[in-house]
Protein backbone atom coordinates (compact mmCIF):
# COMPACT_ATOMS: atom_id res chain seq x y z
CA UNK A 1 0.00 0.00 0.00
CA UNK A 2 2.84 2.35 0.86
CA UNK A 3 4.46 1.81 -2.54
CA UNK A 4 1.21 2.61 -4.34
CA UNK A 5 0.83 5.88 -2.43
CA UNK A 6 4.47 6.72 -3.11
CA UNK A 7 4.06 6.17 -6.85
CA UNK A 8 0.89 8.31 -6.87
CA UNK A 9 2.78 10.97 -4.90
CA UNK A 10 5.61 11.05 -7.44
CA UNK A 11 3.18 11.22 -10.37
CA UNK A 12 1.32 14.07 -8.66
CA UNK A 13 4.57 15.95 -8.12
CA UNK A 14 5.61 15.63 -11.75
CA UNK A 15 2.18 16.60 -13.06
CA UNK A 16 1.99 19.55 -10.67
CA UNK A 17 5.34 20.80 -11.95
CA UNK A 18 4.12 20.42 -15.54
CA UNK A 19 0.81 22.21 -14.95
CA UNK A 20 2.50 25.11 -13.17
CA UNK A 21 5.01 25.51 -16.00
CA UNK A 22 2.20 25.52 -18.59
CA UNK A 23 0.36 28.40 -16.95
CA UNK A 24 0.63 31.93 -18.27
CA UNK A 25 2.73 34.26 -16.16
CA UNK A 26 1.05 37.32 -14.63
CA UNK A 27 4.18 39.27 -15.50
CA UNK A 28 4.67 41.04 -12.21
CA UNK A 29 6.45 38.50 -10.12
CA UNK A 30 6.96 39.59 -6.54
CA UNK A 31 6.77 43.24 -7.52
CA UNK A 32 3.06 42.96 -8.36
CA UNK A 33 2.17 42.20 -4.76
CA UNK A 34 3.37 45.47 -3.32
CA UNK A 35 1.99 47.91 -5.88
CA UNK A 36 -1.55 47.35 -7.02
CA UNK A 37 -2.70 44.54 -4.75
CA UNK A 38 -2.78 42.00 -7.58
CA UNK A 39 -0.88 38.75 -7.79
CA UNK A 40 -1.62 35.66 -5.75
CA UNK A 41 -2.89 37.66 -2.75
CA UNK A 42 -6.07 38.82 -4.48
CA UNK A 43 -9.42 37.24 -3.69
CA UNK A 44 -10.23 36.18 -7.25
CA UNK A 45 -10.74 32.50 -7.95
CA UNK A 46 -8.79 30.68 -10.65
CA UNK A 47 -10.57 31.40 -13.93
CA UNK A 48 -8.78 28.91 -16.13
CA UNK A 49 -8.88 25.16 -16.24
CA UNK A 50 -5.16 24.98 -15.54
CA UNK A 51 -5.62 27.03 -12.39
CA UNK A 52 -8.33 24.73 -11.11
CA UNK A 53 -6.28 21.66 -12.05
CA UNK A 54 -3.35 23.13 -10.11
CA UNK A 55 -5.50 23.40 -6.99
CA UNK A 56 -6.76 19.83 -7.34
CA UNK A 57 -3.26 18.47 -7.86
CA UNK A 58 -1.90 20.50 -4.93
CA UNK A 59 -4.61 19.22 -2.57
CA UNK A 60 -4.02 15.63 -3.72
CA UNK A 61 -0.24 16.12 -3.27
CA UNK A 62 -0.74 17.33 0.30
CA UNK A 63 -3.04 14.37 1.06
CA UNK A 64 -0.50 11.86 -0.21
CA UNK A 65 2.23 13.64 1.77
CA UNK A 66 0.20 13.29 4.95
CA UNK A 67 -0.54 9.64 4.17
CA UNK A 68 3.16 8.87 3.64
CA UNK A 69 3.94 10.64 6.91
CA UNK A 70 1.43 8.44 8.73
CA UNK A 71 2.97 5.31 7.16
CA UNK A 72 6.46 6.42 8.23
CA UNK A 73 5.28 7.07 11.78
CA UNK A 74 3.73 3.61 12.00
CA UNK A 75 6.92 1.99 10.70
CA UNK A 76 9.08 3.84 13.23
CA UNK A 77 7.81 1.48 15.97
CA UNK A 78 8.52 3.97 18.73
CA UNK A 79 12.24 3.29 19.05
CA UNK A 80 15.08 5.62 18.33
CA UNK A 81 18.35 4.80 16.63
CA UNK A 82 20.12 5.14 19.98
CA UNK A 83 17.97 2.32 21.39
CA UNK A 84 18.97 0.10 18.50
CA UNK A 85 22.67 0.91 18.94
CA UNK A 86 22.73 0.08 22.65
CA UNK A 87 20.83 -3.18 22.31
CA UNK A 88 23.10 -4.51 19.56
CA UNK A 89 21.58 -6.93 17.08
CA UNK A 90 18.53 -7.49 19.26
CA UNK A 91 18.69 -11.30 19.27
CA UNK A 92 20.02 -13.08 22.33
CA UNK A 93 22.65 -15.69 21.52
CA UNK A 94 22.84 -14.77 17.85
CA UNK A 95 25.12 -16.78 15.64
CA UNK A 96 28.33 -14.90 14.74
CA UNK A 97 28.67 -16.91 11.53
CA UNK A 98 25.97 -14.80 9.89
CA UNK A 99 27.92 -11.56 10.40
CA UNK A 100 31.24 -11.51 8.53
CA UNK A 101 32.61 -8.76 10.79
CA UNK A 102 31.76 -10.59 13.98
CA UNK A 103 29.73 -8.97 16.71
CA UNK A 104 26.73 -6.84 15.93
CA UNK A 105 28.11 -5.21 12.79
CA UNK A 106 27.45 -1.67 14.02
CA UNK A 107 30.90 -1.03 15.44
CA UNK A 108 34.25 -1.10 13.64
CA UNK A 109 36.49 -4.13 14.18
CA UNK A 110 38.74 -4.02 17.24
CA UNK A 111 41.92 -2.03 16.81
CA UNK A 112 45.38 -3.57 16.57
CA UNK A 113 47.46 -3.13 19.74
CA UNK A 114 50.08 -0.39 19.60
CA UNK A 115 53.49 -1.55 18.44
CA UNK A 116 56.76 0.20 17.79
CA UNK A 117 56.83 -0.98 14.19
CA UNK A 118 56.46 1.81 11.60
CA UNK A 119 53.38 1.83 9.41
CA UNK A 120 55.50 1.98 6.24
CA UNK A 121 58.62 -0.20 6.08
CA UNK A 122 61.84 1.72 5.57
CA UNK A 123 63.83 1.17 2.42
CA UNK A 124 67.39 0.75 3.70
Image: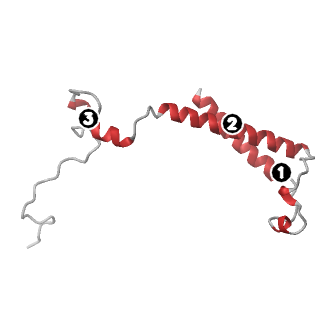
Q: Which of marks 2 and 1 is nearer the N terminus?
A: 1
Q: Which numbered tag is attached to residue 22? A: 1
Q: What element carries label 3?
A: loop
Q: What element carries label 2?
A: helix
Label pair 2/3, CB-CB below 8 angstroms = no
Identify the residue under disc 3: 99
Measured as percent of width and height from the top left, residue 121 is found at: 12, 66
Model colouring: secondary structure
Q: How many labels does the image show?
A: 3
The residue drawn where x is 89% and y is 61% is 38
The residue drawn where x is 21% and y is 47% is 109
Q: Earlier in the sequence, mark 2 or mark 3?
A: 2
Calculate the distance from the C-alpha at mark 2 to the C-alpha at mark 1.
23 Å
The residue drawn where x is 91% and y is 50% is 44
- In this view, 55 is above or below 32: above
Identify the residue under disc 2: 63
Calculate the distance from the C-alpha at mark 1 to the C-alpha at mark 3.
54 Å
Calculate the distance from the C-alpha at mark 2 to the C-alpha at mark 3.
41 Å
Observer-side mark, 2 or 3, equals 2
- Other-residue count near label 3 (Cα within 10 Å), few / some / many at <14 / 14–19 / ≥20: few
Observer-side mark, 2 or 1, equals 2
Q: Which of marks 1 and 3 is nearer the N terminus?
A: 1
Q: What element carries label 1?
A: helix
Measured as percent of width and height from the top left, residue 73 is found at: 52, 35
Question: If the image is split into quadrants, where does the N terminus sit?
Answer: top right
**Which image quarter: residue 31?**
bottom right
Measured as percent of width and height from the top left, residue 86 is found at: 28, 40
Measured as percent of width and height from the top left, residue 5 is found at: 63, 32
- Other-residue count near label 2 (Cα within 10 Å), few / some / many at <14 / 14–19 / ≥20: some
Horizontal placement of 107 versus 74: left or right? left
Question: If the image is split into quadrants, where does the C terminus sit?
Answer: bottom left
- In this view, 31 is above or below 106: below
Amino acid sequence: MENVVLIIHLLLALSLIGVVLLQRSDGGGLGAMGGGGGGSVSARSPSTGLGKLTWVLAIAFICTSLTLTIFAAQNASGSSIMDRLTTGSGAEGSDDATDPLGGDGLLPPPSVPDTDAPLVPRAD
